[in-house]
Image (tube, grey):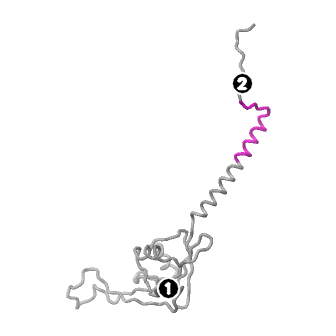
Amino acid sequence: MSDSPIKTPPPFSTIILNENEYNNENENMTENENENKTENENENNKENMRTSTFKISNQAITRRFTLSIEQPTWLELELKVREIFSIPSSVSPGLTYIDEGDDNITISSQIELEDYYKQVKCHEYSDNNIIYRFSLVIFTPLRDYADDENDNGNNPPGYEEHEEHNVRVCPTQ
């Protein structure tokens, strides 16, 4: 008899007969799990990743562009509008829409845009894409405050009067 104890494998242990078969089986399982995980992540990302398409009319033309976020900021929107309509920095763009009371509403700031996002429910949806429709307005200075010799100091420094030029030909809906 020998003094060495007999070692037995623990219960439920895996016996590997062929190491190559085991490695291949594990690789296949991992690839399938990764494929399933990637498909699920893509589906979740598509659901969470809505884009926004803007259709903006100016006189006889309408420009269309898509942004990769559902509700862009006024700065992002203004920069894109300036780019596609070649609007110089000397004037300010605005966007108009007709609300449910048939009033012409102008957006030219972040606060007004946020209010629009909260109140207006009439934009179109298609495949995680929201379509917004606006008309373009341009605000041009009526006068240059620094060159006004007749100013009696009634207005604060930096004050500018603006005249609104609505260049919309027909209402969009």
Dominant SS in magenta: helix
In the picture of the structure, the residue carrying the numbered disc 2 is 9
Residue at point 24% right, 84% down?
155
- Mark closer to the chain start, 2 or 1: 2
Circle 1: residue type:
Ser
Residue 15: x and y, percent?
75, 30
Viewer-nearest residue: 90 or 67: 67
Viewer-nearest residue: 155 or 116: 116
Q: Is residue 54 left or right of residue 6?
A: left
Based on the picture, tell me whether residue 6 belongs to the magenta stretch: no
Residue occupying the far left of the picture: 152
Q: Classify mark 1: residues with Cα within 10 Å, few (<14), some (14-19) or many (20+).
A: many
Callout in the foreground (2, 1) = 2
In the picture of the structure, the residue carrying the numbered disc 1 is 135
Residue at point 39% right, 89% down?
164
Q: For residue 6, what is the image quadrant?
A: top right
Residue 22: x and y, percent?
76, 38
Q: Is residue 2 left or right of residue 159?
A: right
Q: For residue 143, what is the image quadrant?
A: bottom left
Q: CA distance from mark 2 to mark 1?
A: 78 Å
Circle 2: residue type:
Pro
Q: Report the magenta residues as a range.
A: 12-30
